[in-house]
Image (cartoon, rainbow, N blue to C red):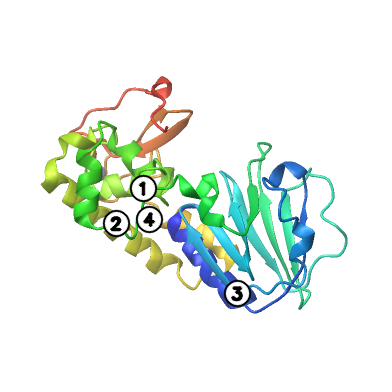
Amino acid sequence: MPELPELDAAVAQIDRLLVGRRLHGVDVAAISVLKTADPPLADLTGHELTGVRRRGKHLLLDLEGVTLVMHLALAGWLRHHAEAPSGPPGPRKGPLALRMVWDDDSALDVTEQGTRKAVALWASTTPEDLETLARLGPEADAVDADDFARLCTGTHSHLKTVLTDQTLLAGIGNAWSDEVLHTARLSPFAAADGLGREGAVHLHAALREVLERAAQGLTGLPLDRIKRAKKALLRVHGRAGEECPVCGTRIAEVSFAERSLQYCPTCQTGGRRLSDRRMDRLLR
Ligand SMILES: [Zn+2]
């Protein structure tokens, strides 16, 4: 799932390519993509893209009074065409979820791999009131050490949950949370309120370090190179069976909440292997 660092890199690219352009039309490949009825997408024709930003794991395109809010779900990503492909996007068999065509005849597509289609689009004059945005906690790259420590001491949740629950902290998902916990040398299943202030400040420093490392690796990349570059930057996530770059131990994997996370048993859990928590519904 696209998270804060790769979405920020995408925001910079969309800003460079499309801000100042006028929207020619938006096509959704399936009606299920669009979550709002008012204002209708057809009304946006002719509106200028005045800004692009990110909130949590959402992209926001500001179009003169109306904001298009996009959530790319698990497998969504963006593609820019200097020249829009001809014809409408058609029925939703392929990866195309929605297409925005601009006045220079370029197009920005949202694509989604796999069979589970979950990309979502909202059009709103007051985006901050949309439930999908109103529920979000503070941005992971904006929260300071004190606020982060308060967040940790205020919950019985596991660290993995604190980092990924969007209502507590917005922008970080399964991949970068694995990286943060590895950098901090903490178990994903450690209790947040057991960290104490010092432990929480240490975890916050790891969060900042990982986000800075990610930004350095992704900033300036074109849209079609960001996802691959992200994969290359990950040290433990998605690397079960490979050697930990810090200590050489084989990276382990454990299931939780229908997903899996990766960690280094030596760096993070005192050599212990975590047991399967598939049933724990860790990600609320
Ligand atoms: Zn290690």
Q: Is residue 206 left or right of residue 99?
A: left
Q: Is residue 55 visible?
A: yes
- Which residue in the structure is indicated by mark 4? 139
Front-most of 35 and 220?
A: 35
SS at mark 4 in the image: loop
Q: Are marks 1 and 2 in contact (CB under 8 Å)?
A: yes
- Which residue in the structure is indicated by mark 2? 143
- Which residue in the structure is indicated by mark 1? 169
In whole angstroms, how far apart are the C-alphas of marks 1 and 3? 27 Å
Kindly identify the amino acid type of the residue bearing the numbered disc 2: Val
Kindly identify the amino acid type of the residue bearing the numbered disc 1: Leu
- Which residue in the structure is indicated by mark 3? 50
In whole angstroms, how far apart are the C-alphas of marks 3 and 4? 22 Å
Q: Are marks 3 and 4 in contact (CB under 8 Å)?
A: no
Q: Are marks 2 and 3 in contact (CB under 8 Å)?
A: no
Kindly identify the amino acid type of the residue bearing the numbered disc 3: Thr
In whole angstroms, how far apart are the C-alphas of marks 2 and 3? 27 Å
Sooner in the amino-acid sequence: mark 1 or mark 4 = 4
Residue 255 in the image, given as x and y percentages of width and height: 41, 28
